Amino acid sequence: MKQKIYQIDTFTNKTFRGNPAMVCPLDGWLSDETMQQIAQENNLSETAFFVKEDEVYNLRWFTPISEVDMCGHATLASAYVLFECMGHDKNEVISFFTKSGILKVWKEDSRYVMDFPIQAIKSCDISEQIEVSFGIKPIAIFSSMDYIIVFEDEEDVLNAKPNLTLLKELDLRAVCITAKSKEYDFVTRFFAPKIGVNEDPVTGSAFTQLVSYWADVLEKNELSAKQVSKRGGEIRCSIKNGRVEISGDGVKYLEGFIEV
């Protein structure tokens, strides 16, 4: 069976930058095993699958080794495919039904705006494990869906070389490191070896947690950020009505078929 597939580079307007995600629009669900095998074969941080039911798209995300409950960049990629490749009205909001509830996406000029829930954070003490893993003493550590590690200087984030084996042993999904920036409000990097992603290029879902810290520290609800991975990506975040709007660009790299 031939299956349509797209690869979209997200949080960028240039190919080979940002975070690539595969998107498979389906007429009906494939088996969980088959979707996991496709994601493993694609070997990107996320492969998204969606099925339309009435006016809502059911959306699921898979890393190469597991299904996850939330993914920002593959949601943006799915919206890109609907808007730019499948003829969805660009003046209408797309509603995705997911394990994280209803996530809405719309277009504002060239950017795709995603409405996500804000994740609360709480202070925690795993400083010894983190200091050993990064060789740097953090100024603050929080837990949420992931660990949020705050460093004193953005150079600490840029130059970090974590011990991925140690990070894999932590109990949460991933570790997100961050620091205040000179050019942006903050910079960040994201490491998730536990779910098969050593370093994610740009992680939309991480910003649902990061805004909880930076909006409070900087006393502002409109934030600019850059995920300073090798590919890099720029993100804008706005806190509105107890939720966060995360926006970025996208560009198509590949359109074709796979044999399933």
Image: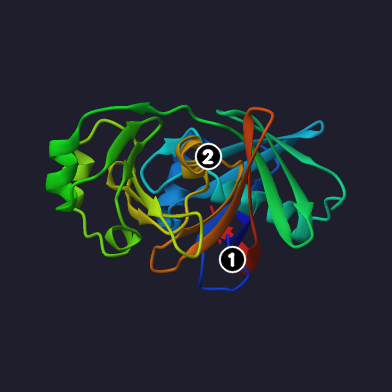
x then y, percent, for residue 73: 55, 51
Count of numbered labels shown in the rendering: 2
The colour scheme of the drawn protein is rainbow
Q: Is residue 79 above or below residue 68?
A: below
Percent across and percent down for residue 221 are 61, 41
Which residue is depicted at the point 83% across and 51% down? 88
Q: Secondary structure at mark 2?
A: helix
Q: Which residue is mark 2?
A: 215
Q: Which residue is mark 1?
A: 12
Is 19 or 151 nearer to us in this picture?
151
Q: Is 57 on the left-hand or right-hand side of 48?
A: right
Q: Amino acid at mark 2?
A: Ala
Taking the view exactly as shown, the residue that stands out farthest to the front is 219
At 45% from the left and 63% from the top, the residue drawn is 182
Label 2 vs label 1: CA separation?
Answer: 23 Å
**Mark 1 neighbour class, 10 Å CA radius: few under 14, some 14 to 19, many 20 or more:** many
Q: Hey, which quadrant is residue 229 in on the image?
A: bottom left
Q: Nearer the viewer, residue 220 or 11?
A: 220
Task: Name the side, left or right, on which 165 lies relative to 229.
Answer: left
Where is residue 240 drawn, in percent x and y?
68, 34
Answer whether residue 48 is visible to the viewer in this image.
yes
| 136 in relation to 220, above or below | below
Q: Residues within 10 Å of mark 2 (few under 14, many from 20)?
A: some
Q: Earlier in the sequence, mark 2 or mark 1?
A: 1
- Residue 97: % across, % down: 66, 31
Residue at 39 percent across and 39 percent down: it is 66
User: Image check: 163 left or right of 21?
Assistant: left
* Secondary element type, mark 1: loop
6 in relation to 67, above or below = below
